[in-house]
Image: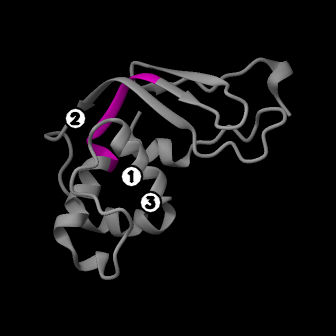
Amino acid sequence: MKLMTHNFLSSKFLKGVVNGYPLLLSATKTEVRIKEFDYNEQFVKKIVPRLDYGVLRLAAESVGEAEGLPPQINDGWENDEEFLRKLHRILVSVEVVEGELKCPESGRVFPIREGIPNMLVNENELE
């Protein structure tokens, strides 16, 4: 599961959960696949406004990949190539292979196996 995917997931569909975001990430195995993806500046510039940067930074910290990321996005980030490259790497090259996601409200755990988060739930867990 890529950290970009994590940024968009929630467990709001669970019974009794109001927000369900952000899911708490606990990775037991991560991989960095740099050679598969060429740097795409335009992609990063288009995706940043859609991200919750604070959540992305926390996820990057949880897998040991936050080095060089500022605590918040600075003014002029669109022209900071070093920042854009680091962000691109974190968004598309860092992948959680094994671990789990945990709902911050209910404590429900969703396993991540072979890079795929299993968000399937029992019918009685749905709103």
Q: Decide whether residue 93 is among the magenta residues.
A: yes
Residue 61: percent from left, percent from top: 34, 43
Residue drawn at (47%, 43%) of the image = 5
Number of other residues with Cα within 10 Å of mark 1, as a class: few under 14, some 14 to 19, many 20 or more? many
| Residues drawn in magenta | 91-99
Q: Nearer the viewer, residue 73 or 112?
A: 73
Which type of secondary structure does the marked residue at label 1 adopt? helix
- Mark 1–mark 3 Cα distance, whole angstroms, equals 6 Å
The amino acid type of the residue labelled 3 equals: Tyr
**Residue hosting label 1:** 57
Q: Nearer the viewer, residue 32 or 39?
A: 32
Disc 1 marks a residue whose amino acid type is: Arg
- Nearer to us of marks 3 and 2 is 3
Of residues 115 and 15, the one drawn nearer to the viewer in this rendering = 15
Residue highlighted by disc 3: 53
| Residue 1 place in picture, x, y as percent | 41, 33
Q: Name the mark on residue 32.
A: 2
Q: Please check the rendered image and state whether residue 49 is part of the magenta-colored stretch, yes or no.
A: no
Closer to the camera: disc 2 or disc 1?
A: 1
Residue 40 location (% of width, % of height) = 24, 60
> Which numbered marker is on residue 108?
none
Q: Which residue type carries mark 2?
A: Val
* Labels 3 and 2 touching (C-beta < 8 A): no
Quadrant of the drawing holding the C terminus:
top right
Q: Which quadrant of the figure has residue 79?
A: bottom left
- Pointer 3 or 2: first along the chain: 2
The answer to which quarter of the image holds residue 93 is top left
